[in-house]
Image (tube, rainbow, N blue to C red):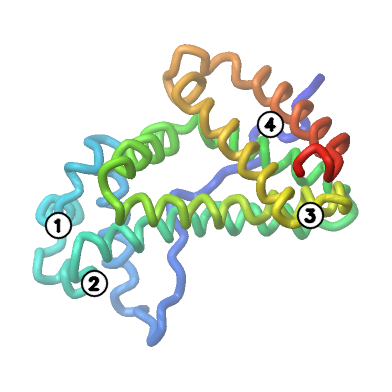
């Protein structure tokens, strides 16, 4: 079975959202700070993301950094928003593709997620946040919000594939799908022991999910 989607998807690291009032003049500095924070988190872990270290890594004075991000929480919130926005744009483009089936579009989303797991950014970034969310309520809230936004396109397509399912049932299946795919990060992510098996895992994942959604009845999830 040939992978029809190989190398089709490239998710940018960050997508900045326009803010009220605009920030055209300082947009480059704003992005520079966020990229420095992302690089620190990927290479050295969340504990390295202090305001002083981000300022030094971005080449911005601490006072200037706090003009854009008054607190570390503000910085982390905007960083996560910029990261998930990059996925939302890709997911939205897939969901609204014309002349293709809902099954094909859901397959595309799954391949995008699984291939992205193989990148250094994703393999390092998300597990770091998962671990931190066990002890930090702020990060826990942000990560739950992030994944809820990421699951939304899957919920839409599951409902389109199997209209008999309720909204809550579609959400539950999307949650199962997300958890199943994200769980592969530690085994088949960047430089992980089974990274070479990701093409097989993609095929197993897609077939399993599509068979599940098509065959599921409302009575299966009372």
- Tell me which numbered mark, 1 or 2, is placed earlier along the sequence: 1
Q: Which residue is mark 1?
A: 51
Q: Which residue in the protein does label 4 denote?
A: 6
Left or right: 183 with respect to 211? left
Distance between mark 2 and mark 4 Cα atoms: 39 Å
The Cα atoms of the two marked residues, 3 and 1, are separated by 45 Å
- The secondary element bearing badge 4 is classed as loop
**Distance from the alpha carbon under mark 1 to that under mark 2:** 11 Å
Asked if marks 3 and 2 touch (Cβ < 8 Å), the reply is: no
Whole-percent x and y of residue 196?
56, 14
Q: Are marks 1 and 4 in contact (CB under 8 Å)?
A: no
In this picture, is 158 found above or below 62? Answer: above
**In the rendered view, would you say 94 is above or below 125?**
below
For residue 89, what is the image quadrant? bottom right
Are circles 1 and 2 on residues that touch, CB within 8 Å?
A: no
Sequence-wise, the earlier of marks 1 and 4 is 4
Residue of label 2: 68
In the drawing, does residue 100 fall left or right of residue 50? right
- Quarter of the image where the N terminus is located: top right
């Amino acid at each position: 079975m040939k992978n029809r989607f190989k190398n089709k998807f490239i998710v940018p690291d960050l997508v900045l959202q326009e803010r009220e009032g605009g920030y055209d003049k300082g947009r480059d500095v704003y992005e520079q700070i966020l990229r420095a924070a992302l690089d620190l988190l990927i290479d050295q872990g969340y504990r390295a993301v202090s305001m002083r270290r981000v300022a030094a890594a971005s080449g911005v004075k601490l006072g200037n950094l706090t003009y854009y991000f008054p607190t570390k929480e503000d910085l982390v919130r905007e960083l996560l928003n910029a990261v998930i926005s990059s996925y939302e744009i890709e997911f939205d483009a897939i969901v609204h593709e014309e002349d293709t089936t809902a099954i094909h579009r859901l397959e595309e989303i799954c391949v995008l997620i699984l291939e992205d797991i193989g990148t250094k950014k994703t393999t390092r970034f998300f597990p770091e946040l998962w671990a931190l969310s066990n002890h930090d309520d702020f990060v826990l809230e942000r990560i739950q919000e992030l994944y809820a936004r990421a699951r939304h396109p899957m919920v839409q397509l599951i409902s389109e594939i199997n209209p008999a399912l309720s909204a809550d049932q579609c959400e539950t299946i999307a949650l199962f799908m997300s958890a199943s795919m994200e769980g592969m990060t530690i085994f088949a992510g960047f430089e992980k022991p089974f990274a070479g098996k990701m093409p097989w895992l993609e095929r197993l994942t897609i077939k399993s999910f599509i068979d599940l959604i098509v065959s599921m009845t409302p009575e299966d999830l009372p």
